[in-house]
Amino acid sequence: MPVDALHFRQHELAFRTQYAELKERTLGAGLLLPGSPGTLALRSGTGFSYWYRVYYSVPRKQSETLVCKDGDSAALEAMRARMDFSGWASDQVSALRKLGFQVADKAVARVLVELHNQGAFEAGLVLVGTLGYMAWLNELGVRAVASRTQDIDLARRQQLKLALPVPFMRTMQATGLPFFAVPGLPSSKPSTSVKLPGVDGLRVDMLVHGKTLGAIVRVPELQWAAKSIPFYDYLLAAPEQAAMLAGAQCVPVRLPQAVRMVWHKLYSSARRRGFPEKAAKDRSQALTLAAALASDDARALKKAGRAAPDDMLKAIRPHAKTLLEQSADHPELCDVLREVLAA
């Protein structure tokens, strides 16, 4: 068996159909209710009665949101419908998790829901990194092992098309989670990340394209800053609408094209220095996606490879032998690698 052979399989058609229905209904649902579906409670006082939604906004933290004045049947029924949908979606996510679909944790869900409700993904924000890989496994109907991550990597190729600025820090604080800004290095530089307390606390990073790895770039529409990553202009070209399963929710997001994600992850793996385990993770994710894609549409994978900048491919070519060894069980992928990486 080849070293580090790729292990994945297709979900059954019925399970892929179940995911597709959940995604389709979620994309048409509009704003999502944060947290658990909750219950309705009538509160009386000062001579008036009001309906509230009582729910857990984050784990172990109960919250209440005003729905309407008692007697406003239209508003009350609208909230009941949203809560019913939230409960149905929660049941679907739970079932899909048991079937082997990729589901991130509740803290990730809370962040993604807030960004969705603020219109950030619709405006062009893109989910990248390991969460993007997990989302693509679900989109492709592929079951594979994905290492858990405590990072949310967000990226934008160009200025987000927002009607008004959406301050990033305020959005993170609106989740109800105790995010704090990670100081820049040196401290005079602006922050590009927020994090939850603790060594394993969730971290949210903002990334953009730039020729110099790690350079700081202002993101004025978010009143924030981002770190630059080479060739992100290639990765983020024409992102696709998709969904991310997290906590008990399905959240609409935008993802890089899977075929471009393959080649950029191979580049990232080749360029990593001092973190062999991260390089191996990037390579494994890239080849798993590539093998799944090559079996259905090798032409699209080749086309994306040929469209990659020359310097990207030059960085990957010295590792071609290792890539072919790891892909030996997938002849369609080997054909793609040989053709694209030929000097």
Image (cartoon, helix red, strand yellow):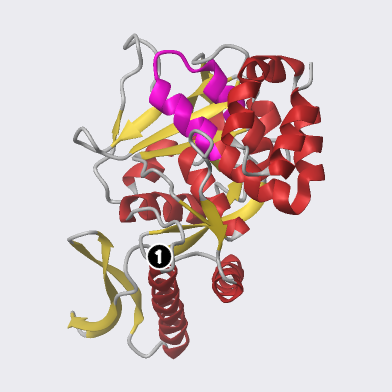
Q: In this view, does 53 lie to the left or right of 282?
A: left
Magenta span: predominant SS is helix
Residue at point 53%, 43% (across, down): 6
Report helix, strand or loop for mark 1. Answer: helix
Q: Identify which amino acid the numbered label 1 is placed on.
A: Arg
Residue at point 57%, 26% (across, down): 208
| Other residues around mark 1 within 10 Å, as few (<14) / some (14–19) / many (≥20) | some
The quadrant the C terminus occupies is top right
| Location of residue 82 with respect to 325 vertically, above or below | below
Q: Nearer the viewer, residue 153 or 35?
A: 153
As for residue 124 lying within the magenta part, the answer is no
Residue 164 appearing in the image: no
As for residue 281 lying within the magenta part, the answer is yes
Q: Nearer the viewer, residue 119 or 308?
A: 308
Give the residue at mark 1.
97
Residue at point 64%, 54% (across, down): 241
Q: Is residue 262 left or right of residue 128?
A: right
User: Over which residues does the magenta segment extend?
Assistant: 265-285
